[in-house]
Image (cartoon, rainbow, N blue to C red):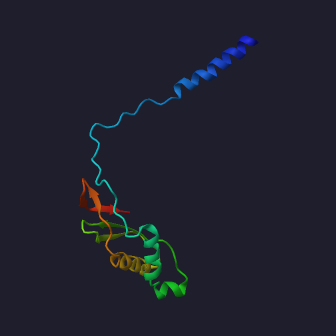
C-alpha cells in the first residue's frame, strides 16, 4: 500500500516538470523606441485635469437628456508641443456633441513639453 502511494506521488509531481515554460528569447531586431522622454502637459496631470474642469462646456442637448460617458481620443504632440491630428477612437452613442466638445478641448490645450529622443524634440502619439 505504501508503494502505491509513493507511485501516485511520483506521477503527480512528475507532471510539474512539464509545466515549466521554455525560454522565449527576444527578437533580434527590436524596434528602437520612438522617444527617450514622453511628452508632458505643462504642470503635469493635475494641471491637465484642472484645464479640463475649467474649460469644458457640456453640450446642452446631452445635458438636458442626462447623457454622459467617456470619449476616447488619440492625438499627436508635435515637436513644438502643439496637439495635432486629434482622432476619435470611441464616443458615446446618441451623444455626438460630447465628442465634438472633447475635440474642441484638445485643440484648445496649451502647448505641451514635447517628447525628446537623443535630446531633440520628436513627435509622439498619445492614446
Residue at far right of view: 1
**Residue nearest the viewer, comparing 58 with 91:** 58
Q: How many marks?
A: 0
Q: Does 63 sit left or right of 121 as displayed?
A: right
Q: Could you tell me which residue is drawn at 26 percent across and 62 percent down?
A: 123
Q: In which quarter of the image is residue 107?
A: bottom left
Q: In this view, does 46 lie above or below 53?
A: above
Q: Which x, y percent locates residue 28?
A: 28, 36
Q: Could you tell me which residue is drawn at 46 percent across and 79 percent down?
A: 95
Q: Which x, y percent locates residue 60?
A: 48, 88
Q: Is residue 79 above or below residue 33?
A: below
Q: Which part of the image, by quadrant, shows the N terminus?
A: top right
Q: Could you tell me which residue is drawn at 44 percent across and 67 percent down?
A: 45
Q: Which x, y percent locates residue 9?
A: 67, 19
**Residue nearest the viewer, comparing 101 with 112:** 112
Q: Is residue 20 above or below residue 86?
A: above
Q: In which quarter of the image is residue 85?
A: bottom left
Amino acid at each position: 500500500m505504501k508503494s502505491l502511494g509513493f507511485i501516485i506521488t511520483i506521477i503527480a509531481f512528475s507532471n510539474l516538470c512539464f509545466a515549466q515554460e521554455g525560454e522565449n528569447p527576444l527578437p533580434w531586431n527590436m524596434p528602437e523606441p520612438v522617444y527617450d522622454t514622453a511628452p508632458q502637459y505643462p504642470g503635469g496631470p493635475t494641471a491637465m485635469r484642472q484645464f479640463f474642469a475649467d474649460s469644458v462646456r457640456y453640450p446642452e442637448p446631452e445635458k438636458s437628456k442626462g447623457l454622459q460617458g467617456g470619449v476616447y481620443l488619440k492625438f499627436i504632440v508635435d515637436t513644438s508641443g502643439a496637439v495635432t491630428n486629434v482622432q476619435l477612437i470611441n464616443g458615446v452613442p446618441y451623444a455626438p456633441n460630447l465628442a465634438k466638445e472633447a475635440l474642441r478641448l484638445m485643440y484648445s490645450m496649451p502647448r505641451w513639453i514635447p517628447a525628446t529622443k537623443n535630446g531633440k524634440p520628436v513627435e509622439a502619439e498619445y492614446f
